Amino acid sequence: LINLVDTLKVVKVTGVHPGAGSPPIAGTVDVQLLINLLDGSGNSSPQGIVYGMPYLRLGGGPWQIACDPAVGDVGFAIASDRDISSFKAAVAGGKSGPVNPGSFRKYDISDGVYFGGWGNGAPKASMWMKPDGTFVITDQLGNVIQSSAAGITFTPAAGGTVSFDGPVSMPDGAAITGNLAATGGIIAGSGGADQVGVQSHTHNLI
């Protein structure tokens, strides 16, 4: 009887089906079970693919971190202790239960939920929340946002720029390293009676 119980299994993602929206809501994945079955004589047989398995997304309240699985990811699937098909249907319809189980099925990988990233290689893009309380966000193109005791550093990819859509305020003593290019105006003393613009400001010859 114990051999018939599915618990936690190592799987590989073979298909991803995100939900609607931008960013999309969490969807489902198709997963290949990676640990073969053995009979009493030691003969192995591969397991099949489980389709339409919900995947885990970190979220709370209005917030979610949208970092969804990709084909080829390796992670885990954990089986529910009850048939969750009716609950999945309720969620798809905008409800959250409680609901009756879809059948008397128990501890079956057909009712699994995927959470992954465990078996993947080194990341090409990452959000590193460091033990000292600082962070480094790096995308696949080489753009980096990094925090430290000195403040926040924006490092664009080679040949790139840092763009701000709207006014930018900087504290006293803040510095920009490198060249500053602005397509709009640069105003000193903005909002004050003596504000001046770089383009409109003139000097009297003595």
Image: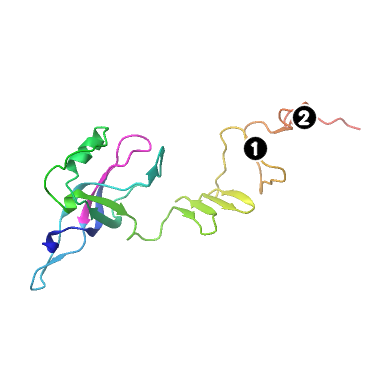
Task: Say what amino acid the circle numbered 1 marks.
Answer: Ser
**Secondary structure character of the magenta stretch overall:** loop
How dense is the environment of label 2, judged by Cα within 10 Å: few (below 14), some, or many (20 and up)? few
Label 1 sits on a secondary structure element that is loop
Residue 181: image location, x then y, percent:
64, 39
Point 72% across, 43% down: residue: 172
Q: Is residue 146 above or below residue 167?
A: below
Camera-nearest residue between 110 and 204: 110
Label 2 sits on a secondary structure element that is loop
Q: Does the image show residue 66?
A: no
Viewer-nearest of discs 2 and 1? 1
Residue 61: image location, x then y, percent:
40, 39
Q: Is residue 17 above or below residue 202?
A: below
How is this picture coloured? rainbow
Instruction: State the extent of the magenta-drawn residues as a range.
Output: 17-32
> Which residue matches tag 2?
201
User: Any magenta on residue 195?
Assistant: no
User: Any magenta on residue 31?
Assistant: yes
Point 63% across, 31% down: residue: 184
How dense is the environment of label 1, judged by Cα within 10 Å: few (below 14), some, or many (20 and up)? few
Point 69% across, 33% down: residue: 186
**Seen in the image, is 132 located left or right of residue 193?**
left
Q: Earlier in the sequence, mark 2 or mark 1?
A: 1
> Which residue matches tag 1?
169
Camera-nearest residue between 190 and 199: 190
- Image quarter of the N terminus: bottom left
Residue found farthest to the right: 206
Q: Is residue 189 above or below residue 162?
A: above
